[in-house]
Amino acid sequence: MSITREVRLADGRVLRAHDSGEDASASLALVWHHGSPQTGAPLDPVAAAAAARGIRLVSYARPGYGGSTPNPGRDVASAADDVIAIADALGIGRFASMGASGGGPHALAGAARHPDRVTGVAVLAGIAPYTEAFDWYAGMQAPGGLRAARRGREARARFTETDEFDPEQFLPVDVAALEGRWASLGADASRAGAQGPEGLIDDDVAFASPWGFALAEVAAPVLLVQGEGDRVVPRRHASWMLAQLPKASLWMRLDDGHVSVLDTVPDAMDWLLARAG
């Protein structure tokens, strides 16, 4: 059971956060950065894995999602200060970060901007910064939203008017995961979509624009977890980030896609626990 908190920022915005609760015996505080789109509410498998390990789990809705004030024009780096504001409001000093899919870049942002607070980062199926060092779109089943985002927020918003979900983005193992152990993820994505497109538009524009920090600035240890068959965020994104991050490891999952790779969440939590000292 998590406690929902609304954290008011100095600029007047509000962020909706979810906290499993302060516990003096907690082995680690972990901030979960949700995918795109999600509401920021804790997902059942993530909450269960954290509880089994005595981890205090905090998640939050990025601006434009799940009750958090929109912040059009935000870059990826802006998440760093947002998360510090939440941690301060909850009385949390040092913490680890974990991000899935669109949450991956935002998890890295905190480690780049606040190295004194973030002990380690796990990125599962996370997108890389836009680069022309390789074909950034190659292997994406449905890159239309990100292509539009490269042209700016207005173009990305227009794309939303005609966009249709392509089920071929998901492998059979992804579909099985969404129908079973990760059903809460699918249900939450549907809730986020019903709340409107603003958060997803701003996410895509942020991903396809300069992030506001360089991967080389991330001094904390980083675990990259990638499905070999991912058709949403292709494997090349992970291998390129591996070469850019100073202290990174890569777990390549040969049989996984974009959703099924999340089954590594418990193991990734163990990896972060081992580096939390």
Image (cartoon, rainbow, N blue to C red):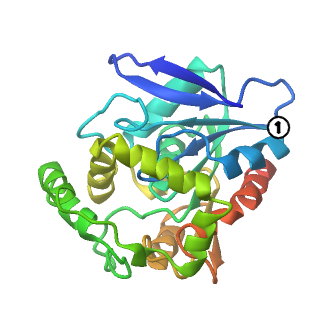
Residue most extreme to the right = 25
Residue 230 horizontal side relative to residue 263, left or right: left
Quarter of the figure that contains the N terminus: top right
Q: Amino acid at mark 1?
A: Ser
> Residue drawn 64% across and 77% down?
253
Q: Is residue 273 visible?
A: yes
Q: Position of residue 28 (x, y in %)?
A: 76, 38
> Residue drawn 17% across and 51% down?
157
The residue pinned by badge 1 equals 27
Q: Is residue 108 visible?
A: no
Quarter of the figure that contains the C terminus: top right
Instruction: Find residue 96 and report its image quarter.
Output: top right
Residue 196 horizontal side relative to residue 34, left or right: left
Q: Position of residue 252 (x, y in %)?
A: 63, 77
Q: Position of residue 225 (x, y in %)?
A: 61, 67
Instruction: Find residue 24 and report its image quarter.
Output: top right
Q: Residues within 10 Å of mark 1 (few under 14, many from 20)?
A: some
Provide the secondary structure element on which disc 1 rests. loop
Residues 112 and 224: in front is 224
